Amino acid sequence: MTTTDESAAASAGVPVAASAGVPVAASAGVPVAASAGVPAAVRIRALRRSYGDVTALDGVDLDFAAGTFTAVMGPSGSGKSTLLQCAAGLDRPTSGTVTVDGTDLGGLSERRLTLLRRERIGFVFQAFNLLPSLTAAQNVALPMRLAGRRPSRAAVRQALARVGLAERAGHRPAQLSGGQQQRVALARALITRPAVLFGDEPTGALDTTTSRDVLALLRELVDREGQTTVMVTHDPVAAAYADRVVFLVDGRLHGELAGASAEGVASYMAGLERGASGGASVGVKAAGSVVDGERAAC
Ligand SMILES: Nc1ncnc2c1ncn2[C@@H]1O[C@H](COP(=O)(O)OP(=O)(O)OP(=O)(O)O)[C@@H](O)[C@H]1O
Ligand SMILES: [Mg+2]
């Protein structure tokens, strides 16, 4: 695999574009459009989700353009996981709409939603959620087998090859490193070639080096296969692997950076933490702007 090399190439030092100080449109509640000419793999409108008295999402408008890599950041409790769960059809919004690959999730029965989730949506979590008694290949095949389908050995092998684990198909999770286990989870999520891959802190349980390898793999899947990817992270270095970083505060979209460096992301987060609600003095790309800045990894 050349993921590390490709990551290094992707992060080659171009001046920071995201800190150039373009006014934000997203924080004014304007829908963040997909890049011109690129269809949205996921379209979110007026999304609200309440749990009793708690408003986790308070009217989010967001598009995730096909073939792009988006990081979602924000303080703890700002609604990041809720956003992903609603966007992935794992949770039902209180109001608003989520459209994945052209299908409005709100109009689907539980059965059809389950089918769409199985076929069109991939999800990886901080915990790898692999079954310890199964081999890597069996873990990758498991969701399809539970759905009554038996993926071919070639399909499973190919899924493992896409994450650089072709040689480890017969290993059990305990025989694999943390990063390799997360790669198996990725292969499991990607075997159906989903329209979008969601990750909720997918590198949160990994050490720095292993985390960078998994991030480089995610980046490579976007660049090589056009895999639309949306990842929640608390790590500015992780976020810098993405084309775009969107920031949530109190269940609302606060702003976004395009092609940001880790420093640019950290600076934005520091602005949020200083309590600059609605007025962080950091540069933000206008909504939907084309990414042509750096993608610094460190
Ligand atoms: N099932 C639930 N029942 C009640 N409240 C919930 C539930 N899920 C989330 N919340 C609340 O909604 C808000 C947003 O939670 P969410 O998990 O989306 O935040 P987050 O941004 O992912 O936080 P973190 O960075 O800590 O993971 C929080 O106030 C949380 O307590
Ligand atoms: Mg969370």
Image (cartoon, rainbow, N blue to C red):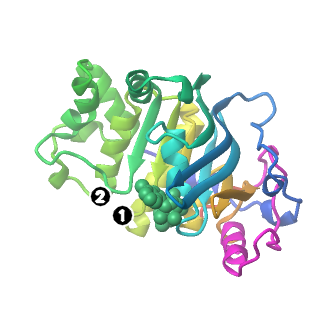
C-alpha separation, residue under disc 1 versus residue under disc 2: 8 Å
Residue at mark 2? 178
Q: Quadrant of residue 295?
A: bottom right
Is residue 267 inside the magenta stretch?
Answer: yes
Residue furthest to the bottom: 274
Pointer 1 and pointer 2: residues touching (CB < 8 Å)?
yes
Answer above or below: position of 281 versus 67. Answer: below
Quarter the C terminus occupies: bottom right
Left or right for 264, reference 220? right
Please state the horizontal and vertical placement of residue 179, each as a whole percent of the image.
Answer: 34, 55
Q: Quadrant of residue 145?
A: top left
- Given the current orientation, which residue lies at the most extreme front position? 53
Q: Residue reaching furthest left?
A: 133
Q: Residue at x 44, y 23 (%)?
A: 109
Magenta residues span 264-293
Magenta span contains residue 229: no
Judge by depth and name the residue closer to the eye, 23 or 15: 23
Q: Is residue 244 above or below residue 296?
A: above
* Dot 2 amino acid type: Gly
Instruction: Kindly identify which residue carries mark 1.
Output: 205
**What secondary structure prevails in the magenta region?**
loop
